[in-house]
Image (cartoon, rainbow, N blue to C red):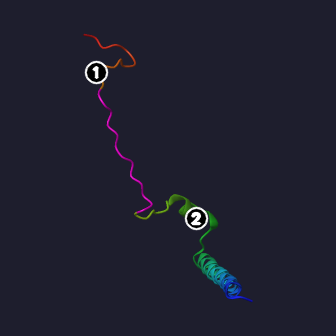
């Protein structure tokens, strides 16, 4: 077994450990939420209403501000619509 294969095997093992730790944290958080809902009598309808009314926040890089566009005045070119009275 060469060094590359050994490193790939270590990487696969680490990926499995990372996935297991993520699931463990998710399961613990879910258990906490369930216990708090039971403790305070919060219904699923209340939770869904709260989640739907809040909008996700974007970071500084995630916000794209639209640039204001100014219409150009045209004098020589024929305009659309009704002709101007002189």
**Residue 84 coordinates in the image, percent (x, y):** 30, 14
Q: Residue furthest left?
A: 86
Furthest residue toward top: 86
What's the magenta region? Answer: 61-73
Note whether 65 is above or below 15 in the view shown: above
Which residue is found at the position 59% from the left and 79% from the top? 36
Which residue is at a point 67% across and 88% down the rendered structure image?
3
Q: Which residue is mark 2?
A: 46
Residue under label 1: 75
Residue 13, percent from left and from top: 69, 86
Outermost residue toward the right?
Answer: 1
Q: Name the N-terminal-most of marks 1 and 2.
A: 2
**Identity of the residue drawn at 45% across and 60% down:** 62
Which residue appears at 42% of the width and 58% of the height? 63
Which label sits in the foreground, 1 or 2? Answer: 1
Pick the front one: 11 or 45:
11
Quadrant of the rendering where the N terminus is positioned: bottom right
Direction from residue 82 to residue 18 in the image, left or right: right
Q: Is residue 16 above or below residue 74?
A: below
Secondary structure that dominates the magenta span? loop
Of the numbered discs in the image, which one, if any, rests on residue 34?
none
Packing grade of label 1 (10 A; few <14, some 14-19, many >=20) is few
Report which quarter residue 83 is drawn in: top left
- Residue 82 x, y percent position in the rendering: 37, 14
Q: Residues within 10 Å of mark 2 (few under 14, many from 20)?
A: few
Q: CA distance from mark 1 to mark 2?
A: 59 Å
Q: Is residue 58 left or right of residue 68?
A: right
Vertical position of residue 13 compared to residue 44: above or below: below
Q: Residue 48 appears in which quarter of the rendering?
A: bottom right
| Residue 69 within the magenta-colored segment of the rendering | yes
The picture places residue 65, in percent across and down from the top left corner, at 39, 52
Secondary structure of residue under mark 2: helix
């Amino acid at each position: 077994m060469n060094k590359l294969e050994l490193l790939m095997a270590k990487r696969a093992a680490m990926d499995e450990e990372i996935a297991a730790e993520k699931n463990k944290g998710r399961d613990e958080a879910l258990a906490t939420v369930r216990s708090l809902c039971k403790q305070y009598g919060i219904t699923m309808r209340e939770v869904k209403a709260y989640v739907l009314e809040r909008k996700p926040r974007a970071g500084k890089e995630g916000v794209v501000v639209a640039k204001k566009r100014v219409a150009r005045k045209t004098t020589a070119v024929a305009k659309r619509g009704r002709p101007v009275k002189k």
